[in-house]
Amino acid sequence: MKRGKNYQDALKSIDKANLYESAEALKLACDTSKAKFDETVEVHLRMGLDGRHADQQIRGAIVLPNGTGKTVRTLVFAKGDKAKAAEEAGSDFVGAEDLVAKIQHENWFDYDVIIATPDMMGVIGRLGKILGPKGLMPNPKAGTVTMDVAKAVHDAKAGKIEYRLDKTNIIHCTIGKVSFGPEKLAENFDALLGAIIKAKPAAAKGQYIKSCTVASTMGPGIKINPTKLG
């Protein structure tokens, strides 16, 4: 794939053979960002795990100290007092069977996070084939199946992100925007890594984090020394 001039210029600033300290890598990601929009910064972690085994799975969520820089639209499935609490917390959409039908029949996706009370999961289960592939299905481990819908809405809008091991044993996460600057990105990076290290499965053997790369939306990957990550 042919890369543009900005990408080629950014590559000149990066030593592809070097494993950087995280703070230096994040500064490079900001310095080499040349796009005309505020690029997102992502972290990609290759883990020393085998996700085919249930005891080596990782899944969780964390509210980043500085948020993600993204406006998050929430959809809450709840009834009665819980629906009212979700509305008062500022959820963009609140409903029950009516919204299940809207998703089924109208292919409706004007939201980023779905939150549900446990009693609604039987109804939402019908949407598994639609929401599952998009990573939108509510999950207790991510804190999106809960009775405290107000807190879940606040957390989602404050910059809560979910981390999970994919089929290739990699974790992909957003940690903010280039406009945050290196210091705020480093705070978010450290919070995410702390959560992932804390979630280390007992069955994990050998090197837990095999490789770590950060990159802005349009920029090249910058490798971080995984042995310095805990």
Image (cartoon, rainbow, N blue to C red):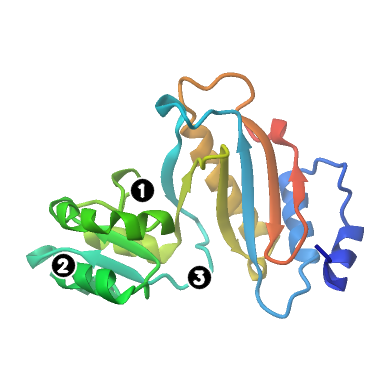
* Residue under label 3: 70
Label 2 vs 3, first from the N-terminus: 3
- Please report contact status of discs 1 and 3: CB closer than 8 Å, yes or no: no
The residue under the point 70% across, 57% down is 215
The residue under the point 41% across, 43% down is 60
Point out which mark residue 142 bears: 1
On screen, residue 8 versus residue 192, left or right, reads right
Instruction: Calculate the distance from the C-alpha at mark 2 to the C-alpha at mark 3.
Output: 26 Å
- Crowdedness near tag 3: few (<14), some (14–19) or many (≥20) residues, C-alpha within 10 Å: few
Q: Please tell me which residue lies in front, 4 or 207.
A: 4
Decide if residue 137 is in sight here.
no
Q: Please tell me which residue lies in front, 92 or 133.
A: 133
Label 1 vs 2, first from the N-terminus: 2
The amino acid type found where label 1 is placed reads: Ala
Instruction: Calculate the distance from the C-alpha at mark 1 to the C-alpha at mark 3.
Output: 18 Å
* Quadrant into which the N terminus falls: bottom right
On screen, residue 199 versus residue 11, left or right, reads left
Give how far across and how far down residue 127 sits, in percent. Answer: 27, 59
The residue under the point 57% across, 19% down is 205
* Residue under label 2: 96
Give how far across and how far down residue 157 sits, in percent. Answer: 39, 66
Q: Is residue 184 above or below residue 223?
A: below
Decide if residue 126 is in sight here.
yes
Instruction: Calculate the distance from the C-alpha at mark 1 to the C-alpha at mark 2.
Output: 20 Å
Give how far across and how far down residue 52 sits, in percent. Answer: 47, 30
Label 2's element? Answer: loop
Label 3's element? Answer: loop
